[in-house]
Amino acid sequence: MEEKPNINYINELAGDDIAFKKQLIAVIKNEFPTEIKTYFENLEKEDYKKLASDVHKIKHKISILGLEKSYNFAVDHEDNLKEGNPSLKDGFNTILQNITEFLNKL
């Protein structure tokens, strides 16, 4: 069964503060597309050092969206990229697509 993004952690952080919840969601929705655009640009260039940095930034949003298995996958992908190995890119791209679809509906 595929993991599904959620805002449970955001709800937990925000509590009854609706404005804070909206602000957190807005930050994620604003930053995520830019971060994945940079990731794909660096993937095309095969710049593994920058890719590892991109994944490092993205993985925190993966965690915030309740995707524990995907977060662990991102950690492995980041480690592999540091070694010049992009072998997990297809799985990571699927995670990015899953999150993008979720954020577009949010």
Image (cartoon, rainbow, N blue to C red):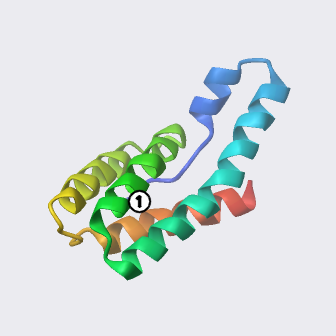
Up the image or down, 95 lies above or below 40; here it is above
Q: Which image quarter is the N terminus in?
A: bottom left
- Horizontal placement of 78 versus 54: left or right? left
Looking at the image, residue 24 sits to the left or right of residue 4; the answer is right
Q: Which residue lies furthest to the left in this view?
A: 83
Q: Position of residue 72 (x, y in %)?
A: 29, 46
Front position in the image: 58 or 46? 46
Number of numbered discs visible in the structure rendering: 1
In-front residue for pair 95/78: 78
Extreme bottom residue here? 44
Callout 1 secondary element: loop
Rendering coords of residue 84 (x, y %): 18, 67
From what the image shows, is residue 39 above or below residue 23?
below
How far across and down, in percent of the image, does residue 16 sit? 78, 18
Q: Position of residue 60 (x, y in %)?
A: 46, 41
Residue at 21%, 57% in the rendered image = 82
Amino acid type of the residue tagged 1 in the rendering: Glu
Residue that lies at the very extreme toward the right in this rendered image? 19
Q: Judge left or right: residue 26 versus residue 71.
A: right
User: Quick one: label 1, few (<14), some, or many (20+) residues within 10 Å?
Assistant: few
Q: Circle 1 sits on which residue?
A: 2
Residue at 75 percent of width and 31 percent of height: 21
At x 24%, y 71%, the residue is 86
- Rendered position, 44 above or below 22: below
Foreground pick, 53 / 75: 53
